[in-house]
């Protein structure tokens, strides 16, 4: 569909969204006006991956019809039938002197335009305020997320860590399928429907700069800044490619984002599993303690790991010794099984040990008063997760 300043913009309703570009504000009718579709498209062409193939750019205005401030989503569509996936952004735009100022998610301009927009909520303004921050985990790999299905259930992992578009990097994504097929929010946050037709793709923006993407779903919710809780139903696993790409067999393409960009899922704990890359896409694995799962095998959803919890990793053994103090020079105080989730009260340096995640002298005091070397525990940090013991 083509738009210009002399015709009324089409309004297409679908799943609670306005798809396409909406009515020209009356205040701009007296002077030539830049087309919003063209302005957003130009921004997307600058922002999208240089190697990504595109089947067109979709602009979905979800708020601000007929005003000088609009908000919505925009997607660089992927060619259907190819092992690629669309790229998508939230966007904010403001009409100034007949020209649209546009900011895409991840740009400082987006945060500034959203902060001044009358169609963006106060909660969203706070949420978007850090969207241009550095993208790296910064040494903290704690997500506070469950796997995107029911806690206590097991689903298959048809594809281990791979790129959002398949073989691209970083390997931000895993494919999950099975169970009752219901895809649930990995953590509470604010949800957005990315495909303008209301199908297939949901993005949930969480706290601490994280977000998660869920693609290929059917029967998914319509969301335009909808508050969701951990475990909220998002849709059913499927093969939807409304925004392009391909899908073989019902599944959800689940991806991790941080500060408005895809980040490597390796090293992060989701649902009790720490993902690991392989040399090639789709072949990576997941670890729970010393239990290894490969593509095609089942992942049990242990639920979200707390920010002051750890998972015992015996580095190939069955148990880890507990001590009465932070070192092997202290008396034995029993043992704890590989894969056990433990609560950490505080930490302190002691004797040095080497485990799966490296060498450290840090010891963690558990809630029962005993101590375990941090070398034999996944916490997501190389430093204390709950302060230093006196």
Image (cartoon, rainbow, N blue to C red):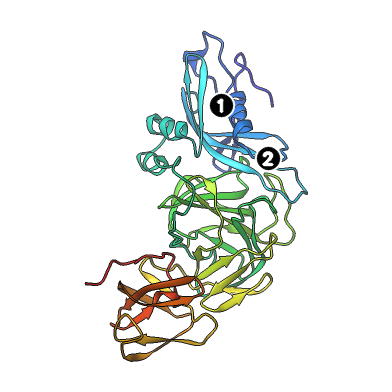
Residue sticking out furthest to the left: 390
Is residue 71 shown to the viewer in this render?
yes
Q: Earlier in the sequence, mark 1 or mark 2?
A: 1
Task: Residue at 37%, 65% (x, y): give it.
Answer: 383
- Asked if 29 appears above or below 381 in the picture, the reply is above
Measuring from the top left, give residue 9's x and y in whole percent. Answer: 60, 23
Tally of numbered tags: 2
Q: CA distance from mark 1 to mark 2?
A: 20 Å
Q: In front: 45, or 252? A: 45
Query: Mark 1 or 2, which is nearer the eye?
Result: 2
- Asked if 82 appears above or below 72 in the picture, the reply is below
Q: Label 2 neighbourhood size at 10 Å, few (<14), some (14-19), many (20+)?
A: many
Is residue 217 shown to the viewer in this render?
no
In this picture, residue 73 sits left or right of residue 361: right
Task: Residue at 65%, 72% (x, y): give it.
Answer: 294
Residue sticking out furthest to the right: 81
- Asked if 241 appears above or below 97 in the picture, the reply is below
The reply to whether dot 1 and dot 2 touch (C-beta < 8 Å) is: no
Task: Residue at 51%, 65% (x, y): give it.
Answer: 270
Which residue lies under the disc numbered 2? 77
Measuring from the top left, give residue 174's x and y in whole percent. Answer: 62, 61
Image quadrant in which the N terminus is located: top right
| Circle 1: element type | loop
């Amino acid at each position: 569909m083509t738009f210009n300043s002399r015709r009324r913009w089409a309004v297409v309703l679908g799943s609670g969204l306005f798809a396409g570009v909406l009515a020209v504000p009356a205040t701009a009718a007296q002077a030539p006006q830049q087309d919003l579709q063209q302005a957003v498209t130009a921004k997307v062409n600058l922002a999208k991956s240089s190697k990504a193939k595109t089947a067109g750019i979709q602009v979905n205005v979800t708020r601000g019809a007929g005003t000088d401030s609009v908000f919505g989503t925009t997607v660089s569509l992927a060619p259907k039938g190819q092992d690629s996936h669309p790229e998508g952004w939230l966007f904010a735009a403001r009409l100034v002197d007949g020209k649209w100022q546009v900011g895409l998610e991840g740009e400082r301009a987006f945060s500034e335009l959203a902060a001044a927009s009358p169609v963006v909520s106060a909660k969203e303004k706070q949420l978007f305020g850090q969207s241009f921050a550095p993208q790296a985990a910064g040494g903290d790999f704690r997500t506070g997320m469950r796997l995107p299905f029911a806690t206590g259930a097991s689903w298959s992992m048809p594809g281990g860590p791979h790129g959002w578009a398949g073989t691209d990097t970083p390997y931000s994504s895993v494919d999950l399928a099975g169970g009752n097929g219901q895809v649930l929010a990995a953590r509470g946050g604010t949800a957005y429907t990315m495909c303008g037709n209301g199908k297939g793709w949901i993005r949930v923006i969480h706290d601490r700069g994280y977000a998660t993407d869920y693609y290929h779903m059917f029967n998914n919710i319509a969301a335009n800044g909808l508050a969701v809780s951990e475990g909220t139903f998002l849709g059913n696993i499927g093969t939807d490619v409304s925004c392009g790409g391909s899908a073989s067999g019902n599944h959800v393409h689940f991806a991790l984002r941080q500060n408005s960009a895809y980040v490597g899922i390796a090293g992060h704990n989701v649902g009790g599993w720490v993902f690991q890359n392989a040399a090639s896409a789709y072949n990576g694995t997941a670890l729970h303690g010393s239990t290894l799962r490969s593509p095609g095998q089942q992942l049990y959803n242990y639920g979200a790991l707390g920010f002051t919890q750890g998972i015992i990793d015996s580095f190939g053994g069955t148990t880890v010794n507990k001590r009465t103090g932070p070192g092997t020079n202290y008396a034995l105080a029993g043992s704890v099984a590989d894969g056990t989730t433990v609560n950490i009260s505080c930490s302190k340096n002691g004797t040095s040990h080497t485990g799966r995640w490296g060498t450290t002298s840090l010891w963690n005091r558990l809630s029962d008063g005993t101590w375990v070397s941090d070398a034999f525990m996944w916490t997501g940090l190389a430093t204390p997760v709950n302060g230093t013991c006196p």
